Image: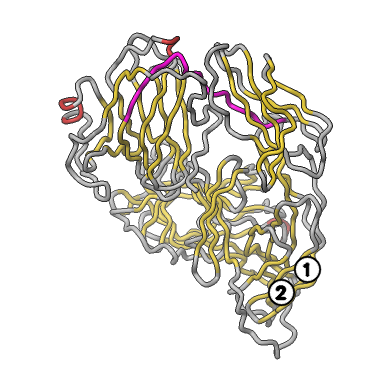
Amino acid sequence: MKRILLTLMIALAAVLTMSASEPTVIFTQDFNAFTEGTEQEPSTTDISTSKLGQTLKGWSGKNVYEAGGKLLIGDYGYLQSSRYDMSANSGIVRITLRVKALSETGGVVRVKLGYTTTKDIYVYDSEWYTLSIITTGGTSSTYVRVEPYITFNGIMVDELKVETSPDFFPVPEALQPTKADGTSFTARWARVTGAKAYILDVYTKAATGRDYVLQNDTVTTTTRKVTDLDASKKYYYVVRATNGTAVSDYSNEIEVIKVVSSIEAPVATAATGVTETGFTANWKSVPEAELYKLNVYKNTRIKETGLTTLLDEDFSGVTQGTFTSVEFGKLQEYLDDYTHQSGWYGVNHVFAAGTIGLAPYGDAASLTTPYLDLSNDEGKVQATINMDAQLFGESLADTVQVQLVDAQDQVLETVTQPLAGGFKPYVINFTKGAANAAVRVYYTGKNKVFIDQMSLAQVLPAGYEIIAPMLSTETEGTSLDVTGLDPMGDGVSYSYTVQSACRSVDYKGEIIYVYSAASNLVKVENENTGIDETVTAKGVKRVTYYDLAGRSSATPHQGVNVVVTLYTDGTKRVTKVVK
């Protein structure tokens, strides 16, 4: 089912009145005159300063392209109508338009009414949606402006219409309760200007429909405490606003989430189906858990005392871009798709085949290794980085900072490293390694710094076991197949812990996940060489969470997440969740 989730600013609006009058159309505009290009292949000529204003008097924009009878608004662009008189009916209008995100992960469409009113609307995929927004803010000279606020590759727009009617009234925004203990909660919603009362419905859901606890309950405040509930049931509520004449549509639906501060850790149990390259992790359920986070580690035992490589990355997974024509990454993201070990993180980075580049462009750029135990050998750590500073493909002298940082992102130690021009391996020695630390290349210059290889090493004693994170993924079940690992044996084994998690609500009223402490650690070794080493079940290799700004993480972001699950057979599954 196609869905549109509104931001905290607005819900989709319509009018529910017993005697609705016919709305007055202020203006309606299709874009049939813009015939160049097609929806599949829009024109590449920006018409915002030429054909747009010539065809539609008073209209303006930025990064606007024809698309076969529709308009494409590119990223960082906008489409703005001419000014109209929207002051009737206290400036309450209904804005209707069709939109389509070009990215399959959707994005945020921003609709503005003049200078004072801004509404942000999420669309979840690349299908066409008809959006209908009732809002205040109309004046005697007001325009409508549409922007691709958080999208990749922009949005398509078609059939923009603005209407007014005395029956229109803005929809209130229902808010998540910050007080909910299972048997009671306090429903909340945002105030609507001009509202004289609010109409609240509270209910549970059954196969036959809604079972109401409250229906058409009228209050004049923006909160209502609901008591004497059954802790075993899940409750929901919606609210409407009225000015005494017009009644708004229903608000967004709130699922009441119990507010908790902690959750019990699960008990991890022995792995089953162990083969040379995989196993099934298992654990016991926790009553309040909604999901579980599995953390898998690779354990490598050191045979002889000496300088031991903890991490060595050549970025051979980067196959796109060149030094003279780089491919830009997201503003910040985990680089698991390009590295041998998970946990590398880039900020303001670019890709050039076989390298990661740092390109500040007004803000610092950085590349950070995975976090490791760097506390051995009294904190002495040796980083070897093969890198070069370039401008338009030509090497030149420059300077970077190489930092040792802790788990709280605090800088423990900084070395300023001059670059001589041309790729060269630079050895940087630190003395303040910590139990959970990383090395970061940090650049604020005007060129690009390309990193071709980077390794970390420490002197470790014989018998010491290096524990490196390999996988962090989430599931609703109590077991998960892990496959495609490096072979066990000859000092290599694996281990795992599990965390339980459930939703809660923070003091701002935002939904968060509360995670338990890690379970007991389970060691996995392939002791039975007679076991069939073929794992027929499809296992999870990696799960990545993307927010709507394109930032990726191994754990959920607050708000809307696009979840990309990569399986060991190479297939992917894309879902959306709200944290």
Badge 1 crowding class, 10 Å Cα cut-off, few under 14, some 14 to 19, many 20 or more, is: many
Q: For marks 2 and 1, give the CA distance.
A: 17 Å
Q: Is residue 127 above or below residue 387?
A: above
Q: Quadrant of residue 162?
A: top left
Asked if the stretch drawn in magenta spans residue 60, the answer is: no
Q: Position of residue 174 (x, y in %)?
A: 62, 28
**Is 28 on the left or on the right of 221, as rendered?**
left
Q: Residue 9: x, y in percent?
A: 53, 27
Across and down, in percent, residue 301 comes to 71, 74
Look at the image and say whether residue 163 sits in the magenta stretch.
yes
Identified at 63% across, 19% down, the residue is 198
Q: Which residue is mark 2?
A: 301
Q: Which residues are magenta?
A: 160-177
Relative to residue 486, is residue 264 drawn left or right?
right
Front-lying residue, 342 or 256: 256
Front-lying residue, 498 or 161: 161
